[in-house]
Image: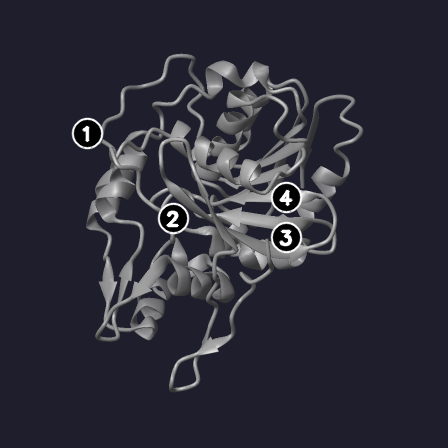
Amino acid sequence: MSASSAPSDACDPDGVLHSLLQPSGTATTPDGVDVCFYDLGGHGPDLVLAHATGFCAAVLSPMAVALRDRFHCVALDLRAHGRSGRPADRDFDWHGFATDVLAVVDCLDLDSPAGFGHSCGGATLLLAEQARPGTFDSLYCYEPVVRPADAPLAPSRNGNSLARGALRRRSAFTSREEALANFSAKAPFDRFRSDVLAAYVDNGFASGPEGGISLRCRREDEASMYAHGFSHDAFARLATIRCPVTLACGAETDSFGPDFLAILAGRLASPTTLALPGLGHFGPLEDPDAVARSVTASLANRDNPNEARTFCR
């Protein structure tokens, strides 16, 4: 594996800098999906980064920059995101995302890496550890999408506002600049740090033959992912996870806040819960440096998980 996925510093003819990443390699899952992964560099224990629904590995690269002095960071595009392939059966059960993570861990022969996951990515890491206990040394899950009930819901788009929103998402722009201007003016993208937003546009969209760009994660696929968001069984099996797990949220979140995290923590063997000030559900994309500091502090203490800890700071 090489470090070729560092930002390419490529410029278009008018000199505008792009934050392009190139995959370091591809891992093929047992169900035949080609999953792209990226070596984001760094020194220390391996840290696997998993992104939220609809995004791609590159949006976590600014956070990885702040983690490189403590961790060797590897990120992946979950199936149907970024440059990764789509499942042939178009089934977006979230256990498939866990399969993607495990395929990358196996491809790179990672030995007990740590893991960071945001939203869907957090649930994905929990599902991966449940599928293969002992895969991870420790986990940091920022607002993981895990419904606090033992019985999963049947996948459905009915009444699912996120699925409806995905189907309405604008999927093409005439230029990179138009896309940046569009996202900068609407929530939640207007809270993203500028380099994160640039990474999303440059890597979450593909260039067209006539200069335009189009969304890599198809709208219908994203809607199906949201339809499956509460249909996995991660909550029912949380007690099987024995490694230390940090559950974090933004103190200003409107999604999965401290009360929700406390319910999940009650089922884990070695939990820590955190509320990060000034951040919302998209905290890792709003202030990558602040979340990186929290990840470093949390995972640096993973060798002494004596008891559950709660910090609201």
- Report how far apart the C-alphas of labels 1 and 4 lie in the structure: 37 Å
Q: Visible in this render: residue 248?
A: no
Asked if residue 186 lies left or right of residue 29, the reply is left
- Report how far apart the C-alphas of labels 2 and 1 lie in the structure: 28 Å
Three-letter code for the amino acid on which mark 2 is drawn: Ser
Q: Earlier in the sequence, mark 4 or mark 3?
A: 4
Residue drawn where x is 31% and y is 66% of the image? 182
Q: Pinpoint residue 105: horizontal percent, then vertical percent.
A: 56, 38
The mark lying in front, picked from 2 and 1, is: 2
Residue position marked by numbered label 4 in the rendering: 47
Residues at circles 1 and 4 in contact by the CB criterion of under 8 Å: no
Q: Earlier in the sequence, mark 1 or mark 4?
A: 4
Q: Earlier in the sequence, mark 4 or mark 2?
A: 4
From this viewpoint, which residue is outermost toward the bottom? 14
Q: Visible in this render: residue 86?
A: yes
Q: Pinpoint residue 186: horizontal percent, then vertical percent.
A: 33, 59
Residue position marked by numbered label 1 in the rendering: 158
Q: Earlier in the sequence, mark 3 or mark 2?
A: 2
Residue drawn where x is 51% and y is 15% of the image? 237
| Residue 32 vs residue 257, the one in the foreground | 32
Residues at circles 2 and 1 in contact by the CB criterion of under 8 Å: no
What's the mark number on residue 290? 3
What's the mark number on residue 253? none
Residue position marked by numbered label 2 in the rendering: 84
Please tell me in which quadrant of the rendered image residue 46 appears: top right
- Report how far apart the C-alphas of labels 4 and 3 lie in the structure: 17 Å
The mark lying in front, picked from 4 and 2, is: 2
Q: Secondary structure at mark 1?
A: loop
Residues at circles 4 and 2 in contact by the CB criterion of under 8 Å: no
